[in-house]
Image (cartoon, coloured by chain):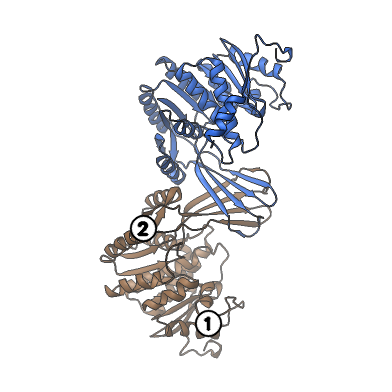
Chain colours: A blue, B brown
Amino acid sequence: VILVVSLNPALDVTHHVDGVDWAGVNRPGQVRAAPGGKGLNVARTLHARGAEVMLVGLAGGIAGAAIRSGLRASGVAARLTEIEACTRRTFAVVDTRRGEVAMFNEPGPEVTSGEYSRFLAAYKEALTACTTVVLSGSLPGGLASDTYAGLIRIAASGGVPAILDTSGDALRRGRGGQPARVQPNHAARAQAVGRDGAWSSPPDRSAVLGHAAELRNRGALAVVVSMAADGLLAVTADGTWHAAAPPVDGNPTGAGDAVVAALAQGLTGGWSWPERLREAAALGSATAAAPGAGEFLDEDLARARVGVQVTDLEHALCPSFR
Amino acid sequence: VILVVSLNPALDVTHHVDGVDWAGVNRPGQVRAAPGGKGLNVARTLHARGAEVMLVGLAGGIAGAAIRSGLRASGVAARLTEIEACTRRTFAVVDTRRGEVAMFNEPGPEVTSGEYSRFLAAYKEALTACTTVVLSGSLPGGLASDTYAGLIRIAASGGVPAILDTSGDALRRGRGGQPARVQPNHAARAQAVGRDGAWSSPPDRSAVLGHAAELRNRGALAVVVSMAADGLLAVTADGTWHAAAPPVDGNPTGAGDAVVAALAQGLTGGWSWPERLREAAALGSATAAAPGAGEFLDEDLARARVGVQVTDLEHALCPSFR
């Protein structure tokens, strides 16, 4: 069983409106609402792929109730610790006429120490049945920035390797716990090493490699950097690889979480790094190709698997990758 | 116990943003989310006033789960029949810098005949313990426009009087059931008699009286027309009255539902029409005076009670009211 930790889930609501009246009444033609946040996306992708998955985390208030209900409907096993404060929502208004998207991101809840203690008990109990733990997304208010480090330490003491996908302080401090894998996403990576967060486009791969090495020096056993359409870069004890799928048009939302899901399956299954990266890049690409956030079609995945190029950068012929 | 029927509740979410970026990411400074729809407002107001209330209706999907959770937290006794389709949400984005409000109203769910049958069983069971029934708000998809007429007939056969507060076809056809009271709101009233829905401002009271009489001819025992700041007009078998509170600044959302709540208490308690109208106008005014939708302060209510003018239009000295 893969254990997914989501401490700050969200209820994601999207309205499609053909020409928004920003000072009047709108009747959205299309409405989507689903439990979201990076951890929930990872758990749902794993569940859709037939992997055994258990979700733990924090949820409260009426948005928390909505998330619990949505998870029940999707069949993802979840044990969310109840909190007093209300779980956050995100609200996206897609103006299909103007081609604009307005996002409204509510602040996350404040978590009390008593609530976090109850979560910790549930986390420890769930860990006993799990082979891998994935820690995804931001931290809600009230939790220390080294929270992930503590959770990774607890997992490690039980022999369970961890994949961390977060950003900012939560990533910087999260690595103190000697995680088995750090999986910073595109925008997060530069923050984690305390440098200017802006990427050149396409990113400078030698700079990425340097930063990934720095993350490893700070305690990560392996670093996988997701560079959106420019693929994945993995710096590990076994070697350094680049994996990229052919470019696709679609909706990149959730593609990074699909990458994490595939990496978790590869870690659980004992796949080699090139195998993990091929599947992760393919699943990320198939997810980006589907119109719905976090969805993918089996045919897109099959096509992407064939198209992925995995390059061993330590033995590459192309010097630009060195 | 006052039974409140809400067949098409909503989850109402409001974001306050200081200067909205309609093509970017916004972080609302203030977020409100609560179960809404007219019936839920009535039930909550009755509960806040210490009246015994039971809510029945339909709710489904993740918004339905959020509504159930919010009702539990508010302490309102509710028995909502589960439906497959998702209960609607409303999203209000208040731009505090520009003074504009954008509303996003999701379409209501489609209700199946099996689901409505299950609701009917719950309704009939709840009726046995109730003295008054309030039917509030719009009908969701899949229900016939004479749905309220049927529910009013069932209540009448058990000796339970009904107050109906709805609009459009649901009101026009709802009256076929010989309701004890029809309480069309301001905008709804003119629609109900098949005329142009637009009010002159201030409304022409003799025209309102004529329309109310027409509604009574079609089966309503009494008609109370809520004219916002212009007060209430009641046409009943006992007489015709006008009641108005002094004007207030605030948030008129939910004031009409507060009027209905007070009328239901008056009907249950056997108050005279002037007593009912005084309390209804006062509670509506106190609700309009409070900043939060559907909230009121006891001190505002006490002040409004003193300020309400109730005029007997059949014996009025002022001929303009005749």
Could you tell me the amino acid type at mark 2?
Glu
Left or right of residue A289, residue B147 in this image:
left
Residue B191 spot, x, y in % from top left:
53, 76
Discs 1/2, front: 2
Residue A165, given in percent of the width and then of the height, sits at 55, 26
* Residue that badge 1 annotates: B208
Q: Please determine whether, in this image, residue B132 is positioned above or below residue B53.
A: below
Q: Is mark 1 on a helix, strand or loop?
A: helix
Mark 1 is surrounded, within 10 Å at the Cα level, by few (under 14), some (14 to 19) or many (20 or more) other residues, namely many
* Residues at circles 1 and 2 in contact by the CB criterion of under 8 Å: no
The answer to whether B107 is drawn above or below residue A157 in the figure is below
Whether residue B32 is visible: yes
Residue A94 image point, x, y percent? 63, 48
How busy is the neighbourhood of tag 2: few (under 14 within 10 Å), some, or many (20 plus)?
some
Q: Earlier in the sequence, mark 1 or mark 2?
A: 2
Q: Which mark is residue A257?
A: none
Name the residue: 40% across, 81% down: B219
Point out residue A66 in the picture as x, y percentages from the top left corner: 44, 45
In the image, is B318 to the left or to the right of A18?
left
**Image-quadrant location for residue A241:** top right
Q: Distance between the residues labelled 1 and 2?
A: 38 Å
Q: What residue type is labelled 1?
A: Val
Q: Name the residue under label 2.
A: B115
* Chain hosting mark 2: B
